[in-house]
Image (cartoon, grey):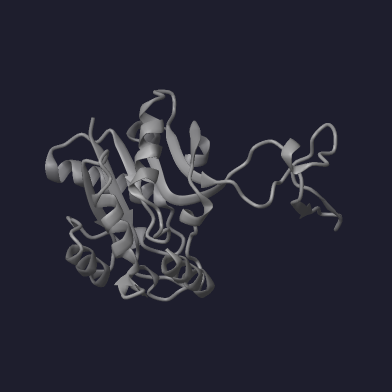
Amino acid sequence: MFILGTICCRGGSKGVPGKNIKPLLGKPLIAYTVETALNTSLINDVIISTDSLDIANIAKQYGSNVPFMRPADLATDTASKWPVFIHALETYEKMNGITVDYLVDMDVTVPLKLPIDINGAIQKALDDINVDVVITGYEPERNPYFNMMEIKPNGFAEIVKKSDKPIVRRQDAPEVYSLTPAAYVVKKSALYNYDHWSNAKCKIFPIPRERAIDIDTETDFKMIEFLIKQQ
């Protein structure tokens, strides 16, 4: 069993320019994920997939391997991560003569994740041979069966997920999770059997909300800084 850890991060970022290497309390953002990945016991090797030499050089300073650069066509705003995963896996296999069984992608934008979160998601995938993908998630403050609405073509708002009887207590609503890209554990065969993870057989590995915050804006960055200082 060979489990490849990937940290896929391109140079461009619109929400927070230079986000992946932006200093977070004196350390580049990518360094948090590199250190977590290198301390995750169920991962055999960790590589960076990036189109940016700046990102590559900083990742190397923190001990990560950058065996190749990502092609430009896989580093655009519209590029899906699925073909990025395939490129990383196939290139790694060819370079090392190794067959990868699972790919574990860990997003730079979730810096507070811990090795226990990554290991837990991996173990959940290993425990069920029928599972194609395990994704980290957390219990959200909103539930589509209870307090989330969508605007219909007629202009009126309706509850997102209707049930046979209206749900009047949050506790009675079906269990739902918000996804966080702390870890995507993907079986190799799933990369070729499906064109997107949402079409595969998925399970969720819950992690605490405070470790699941995904940086997308400057406000998110400040929130992460606050939480680290509180720790």
User: In the rendered image, is residue 196 in sight?
Assistant: no
Which residue occupies 45% across, 51% down? 181
Viewer-proximal residue among 102 and 63: 63
Residue 221 at x, y percent in the picture? 47, 71
- The quadrant in which residue 117 appears is top left
Q: Nearer the viewer, residue 107 or 81?
A: 107
Quarter of the image where one finds residue 7? bottom left
Residue 198 visible in image: yes
**Where residue 60 sits in the image (x, y, percent)?**
18, 63
Residue at (86, 55) in percent of width and height: 156
x%, y% of residue 208? 50, 49
Q: Is residue 173 left or right of residue 36?
A: right
Q: Who's the residue at 13% across and 38% down the image?
A: 97
Q: Position of residue 5 (x, y in %)?
A: 28, 46
Count of labels in the image: 0
| Image quarter in which the C terminus is found | bottom left
- Quadrant, the N terminus: top left
In this view, which residue lies farthest toward the top? 129
Left/right placement of residue 174 relative to residue 13 reads right
Q: Is residue 161 left or right of residue 116?
A: right
Q: Is residue 220 above or below residue 4?
A: below
Q: Quadrant of residue 229?
A: bottom left
